[in-house]
Image (cartoon, rainbow, N blue to C red):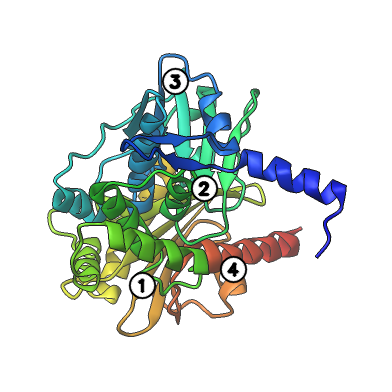
Amino acid sequence: MYVTMKQFKILFACLLCMCLSVSCSDSDETIVYCTPLRTIITGMDYGDGVLVVGHKSPDCDAVLSAMTYASLLQRMGINAEARVAGKVICEPRYVLQEAGIEAPAILDDAAGQNIIMTDHSEFAQAANGMSSARILHIIDHHGTGSVTTPQPLFYYALPVGSTCTIIASMYEELGEKPTATEARLMLSGILSDTDNLTKVTTTATDRRLYEWLRQQSDISDVEAYYAAMRKARTSFDGMTDDDILFSDYKEYEIEGYKVGIGNVFASDELGVEELCQRMRQIMPAVRAQQGLDMLFMMLGDRQANVTHIPFCGDGAREAAEAGFGASANSDGCIVVTYISSRKAQFLPAITEGIRQTTFNIQ
């Protein structure tokens, strides 16, 4: 095979940019040459330091991606600290307890801070004051959100099932081997956000890095560990109904409407029908409190393979019926075949429903 001079120059330039690790023959020292990714990240101005934080109502992926990305930045000499945008409960609390790690401190106000956002790019989902923060990085696996910045931004997004998958890929690309604890945390984020690689959003990249992290983590039985994670996710012990609603909750701007979407799985102790009734009782007050036009809940029942969708707000019934092609029952709830992903399944359907409803009204 012949290579033209132009092809040779391109190949040579690529080789110069690759990360090369050279082990000295007479010592254990390893010389690591910087990659473009490392150069870009370390070349930014972080001032006195930067805070890494996921979205409000922090789930596993939000908490653990912030923690492991902060750890990766620290390896590169950057003064980075993880924070959370709300109280850590249920599944992420279990993961941290099993790892023997304290939850990061809550970031009450991001205004004026140097910030890195993980697992979100929406101001509506961000810590208070984020619109007045200096946002330096966004690491995310969702669609582009409402965040804009006046200064250049490092935006790293991949169409994968978990932000922790992206963080793991960065460890790999930078030649940084995660510790057993870091691998455990990233693996836990992937397990949670992909439902153990069963969600429709799961990709080949998630599966490959899942296996890479599994081999380096200190989790001996991943299936048993994931079962315990699921039990923690659906355990509402000591939680108020508000705690349950906000345990996995996000807000969006859709066609000019402010929309809240909660995602809760029913437990054996609290069946989906009882859960639906309890959520419906508090949803009007929550909608008013959050200043929402519409509020929806995804109440999943894996065993019955259904998702109950209670709703609240003017136009919410019409949007839900248009989006999911089902009629609400007398209890003000739609029941559909099980929905595993808010991002890939619920959000597109309700967005289309709101668009149809808005068009019909106009």
First reached walking from the N terminus: tag 2 or tag 3: 3
Q: In this view, does 260 lie above or below 226?
A: above
First reached walking from the N terminus: tag 2 or tag 1: 2
Circle 1 sits on which residue? Answer: 300
Q: Decide if residue 281 is in sight here.
A: no
Secondary structure under the numbered disc 3 in the rendered image: loop
First reached walking from the N terminus: tag 1 or tag 4: 1
Secondary structure under the numbered disc 2 in the rendered image: strand
Which residue does the image show at 82% across and 56% down from the upper left?
3
Pinpoint residue 21: horizontal percent, then vertical percent: 46, 42
Which residue does the image show at 36% across and 47% down from the upper left?
177
Q: Give the Cα separation between the discs numbered 2 and 1.
A: 24 Å
Circle 2 sits on which residue? Answer: 140
Q: Give the Cα separation between the discs numbered 1 and 3.
A: 37 Å
Q: Point out the frontmost of discs 2 and 1.
A: 2
**Dots 2, 1 in contact, CB < 8 A:** no
Going by the numbered disc 2, the residue's amino acid type is: Asp
Going by the numbered disc 4, the residue's amino acid type is: Ala
**Dots 2, 3 in contact, CB < 8 A:** no
Q: In this view, does 299 lie above or below 305?
A: above
Question: Which label was assigned to residue 349?
Answer: 4
